[in-house]
Image (tube, rainbow, N blue to C red):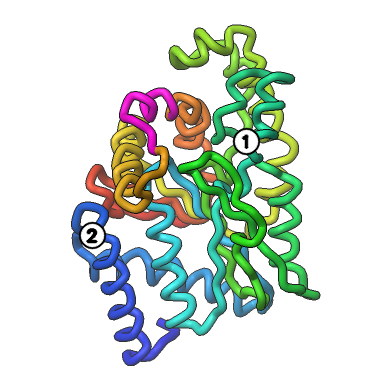
Amino acid sequence: MFFTDIKYKKIEKKYLNYLKSQEALSEPFRDKIGQLKKFYLPISTRIYSSFLKTKKTKVIGLTGGQGSGKSTISNILKIIFQVGFGLKTTIFSIDDFYKTLSERKKMSINVNPLFLTRGVPGTHDTRLLFNCIQKLKNSKFKKFYIPKFDKSIDNRLPKNKWQRIEKKPEIVIFEGWCVGANPQKKKDLLKSINILEKHKDKKRIWRNKVNNELKKNYKKIFNLIDTLIFLKVPSFKHVYKWRLLQEKKLRLSSSGKKIMTDNQIKNFIMYYERITKHMFFTLDKKAKFVIKIDNKHRFKSMKIN
């Protein structure tokens, strides 16, 4: 390890306190110290070793299905990077770069009605996202703002509520459900995979547009990632189950705001199904770290490519 026993104790204390704060909104975490030593510390240590070679900002892509724990894992890694290695760390989500509601309304009229619903490639402001990551990596850093998106109102927040980045980070954790995703082959787009595609994308306009976005604009963004971590969930049915838990958390923390019903969530995740299932097979070799997650949200095993 790169840190002393004293630093390890500080990491452990902050890590356990963070998990305790999260347990108020979810089921209890299991094997906390074992998960820290077997997974979190080895991952962060390898990334730190890579950082030392260049001393340049490292962008860590963290990807996995909805509800796989990306936000929690991002914050745990941030604790280790900052407390253990003294590295300034910034976290942001691809979700905060969704196009505004008015922009998606225009897409739904001009391209396909399905683009009104946020989520898939094509519904993010890719120019803003690309510029943001470039600014974070730029050696001539100047303070700027990262957008914030409020899912309860389905719209981007005004600029006075954006995240302010005043100092150049050494580690950037960029998390999102489709981060690092590859496009599919044309022949794989021919057959509908669920009732949403079968009834609302009969001419395949929506899925072809999504796939083309992955080929072009998103590829440019994902090429800026230095290390990709893939959280491999047991199956797509767990994505639905865990998305329900996410919404439960949102209900507890967003009093009075519009939250989706269980049926709405069931329909909502159909938008994500095609790419999520494709990622199960393609990111196994592409990602630097592939972490298998069991049905209780615990890390089961890790492969390093």
Q: Amino acid at mark 2?
A: Ala
x and y, in percent, of residue 246 in the image:
34, 44
Snapshot quadrant of residue 31: bottom left
Residue 300 horizontal side relative to residue 99, left or right: left
Residue most toward the front? 256
Identify residue for label 2: 24
Q: Which residues are magenta?
A: 259-268
The residue sitting at 42% across, 75% down in the picture is 80
x and y, in percent, of residue 241 in the image:
29, 35
Snapshot quadrant of residue 236: top left
Residue most toward the right? 140
Q: Nearer the viewer, residue 212 or 50?
A: 212
The residue sitting at 44% across, 12% down in the picture is 195
x and y, in percent, of residue 273 in the image:
46, 27
Q: Nearer the viewer, residue 236 or 48?
A: 236
The residue sitting at 58% across, 54% down in the picture is 148
Residue 91 horizontal side relative to residue 127, left or right: left
Mark 1 secondary-structure assignment: helix
Identify residue for label 1: 101
Query: Which SS type dominates the magenta stretch?
Result: helix
Q: Is residue 4 above or below residue 147?
A: below
Q: Is residue 4 above or below residue 286?
A: below
What separation in Å lies between label 2 and label 1 (alpha carbons)?
Answer: 32 Å
Q: Nearer the viewer, residue 156 or 199?
A: 156
Q: Is residue 47 magenta?
A: no
Q: Is residue 141 above or below residue 68?
A: below
